[in-house]
């Protein structure tokens, strides 16, 4: 079933879009099934869960931290994580940098931008982010590589609203690209789109979609 789901989704995605299979709450067996169907990029939103699973799975899996990350847990994932999607404070950037220096690693990250209507979601306010990036305090953080942006749309059936929010994230990306990262080839990722809205996200220029339910089925939070 999982392999079939993956096949169906992949067929639909343009070649330049990376599919991250979001395996949170799902057992190692399910992840292996996806792996055997050729999937290599997996996303988790909890540090402990990702660390526990990784030891039971093939080493060539590319792990994506897609959830909110607390600074005191950064040290557990920097040794192996491929991409940290939810970077939303200078303090977190500094902590990731510090751990990356220790490991002699350049850590790839995405800046999470608040695009949804709901006030509770994480992410930078875009104007504050711009101001921060112009202050250059972050520029000395040479062991983090900011590869793009990430965002989550409002959970709503109003597709126009979702489209507007994704379009806004793309505009944020363009502004950052021209004002801050114009010489950085690696600044090219827009992580947006989940099971319910990935088609809209791809239409608005997503380069990474994060899909769980459509691959692994509904999650049980017990
Ligand atoms: C859970 C989660 C997803 C995947 O959600 P689905 O609706 O199951 O596809 C994507 N992104 C983030 C940040 C998540 O926490």
Image (tube, grey):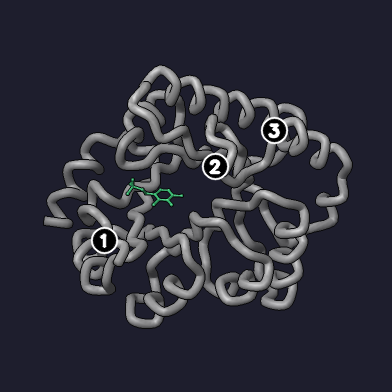
Any part of residue 66 in sight: yes
Q: Is residue 114 left or right of residue 96?
A: left
Any part of residue 186 in sight: no
- Residue lying farthest bottom? 55
Q: Which mark is residue 220?
A: 1
Q: Secondary structure at mark 2?
A: strand
User: Cα distance, mark 2 to mark 1?
Assistant: 25 Å
Q: Is residue 94 left or right of residue 186?
A: right
User: Cα distance, mark 3 to mark 1?
Assistant: 34 Å
Evaluate if marks 2 and 1 touch, with contact meaning CB atoms under 8 Å apart.
no
Which is in the foreground here, disc 2 or disc 1? 1
Q: How far across and how far down the image is residue 93, in percent?
A: 72, 57
Q: How far across and how far down the image is residue 73, in percent?
A: 61, 72
Could you tell me which residue is drawn at 35 percent across and 56 percent down?
Answer: 22
Q: Which mark is residue 126?
A: 3
Camera-side residue: 47 or 119?
119
The quadrant in which residue 9 appears is: top left
Q: Which mark is residue 150?
A: 2
Q: Is residue 1 left or right of residue 175?
A: left
Could you tell me which residue is drawn at 61 percent across and 39 percent down?
Answer: 113
Camera-side residue: 32 or 220?
220
Could you tell me which residue is drawn at 31 percent across and 51 percent down?
Answer: 212
Is ligand 1 closer than 8 angstroms to the Cβ of mark 3?
Answer: no
């Amino acid at each position: 079933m999982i392999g079939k789901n993956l096949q169906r989704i992949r067929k639909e995605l343009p070649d330049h879009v990376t599919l991250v299979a979001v395996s949170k709450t799902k057992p190692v067996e399910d992840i292996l099934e996806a792996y055997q169907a050729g999937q290599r990029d997996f996303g988790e939103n909890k540090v402990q869960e990702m660390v526990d699973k990784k030891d039971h799975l093939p080493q060539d899996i590319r792990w994506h931290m897609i959830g909110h990350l607390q600074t005191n847990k950064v040290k557990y994932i920097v040794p192996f994580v491929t991409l940290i999607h939810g970077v939303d404070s200078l303090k977190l950037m500094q902590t990731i940098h510090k751990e990356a220096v220790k490991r002699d690693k350049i850590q790839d990250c995405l800046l999470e931008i608040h695009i949804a209507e709901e006030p509770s979601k994480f992410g930078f306010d875009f104007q504050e982010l711009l101001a921060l990036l112009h202050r250059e305090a972050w520029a000395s953080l040479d062991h983090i590589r900011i590869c793009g942006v990430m965002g989550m749309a409002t959970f709503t059936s109003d597709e126009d609203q979702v489209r507007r929010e994704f379009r806004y994230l793309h505009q944020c990306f363009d502004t950052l690209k021209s004002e801050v990262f114009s010489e950085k080839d690696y600044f090219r990722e827009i992580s947006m789109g989940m099971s319910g809205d990935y088609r809209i996200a791809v239409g608005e220029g997503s380069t990474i979609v994060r899909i769980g339910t459509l691959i692994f089925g509904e999650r049980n939070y017990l």
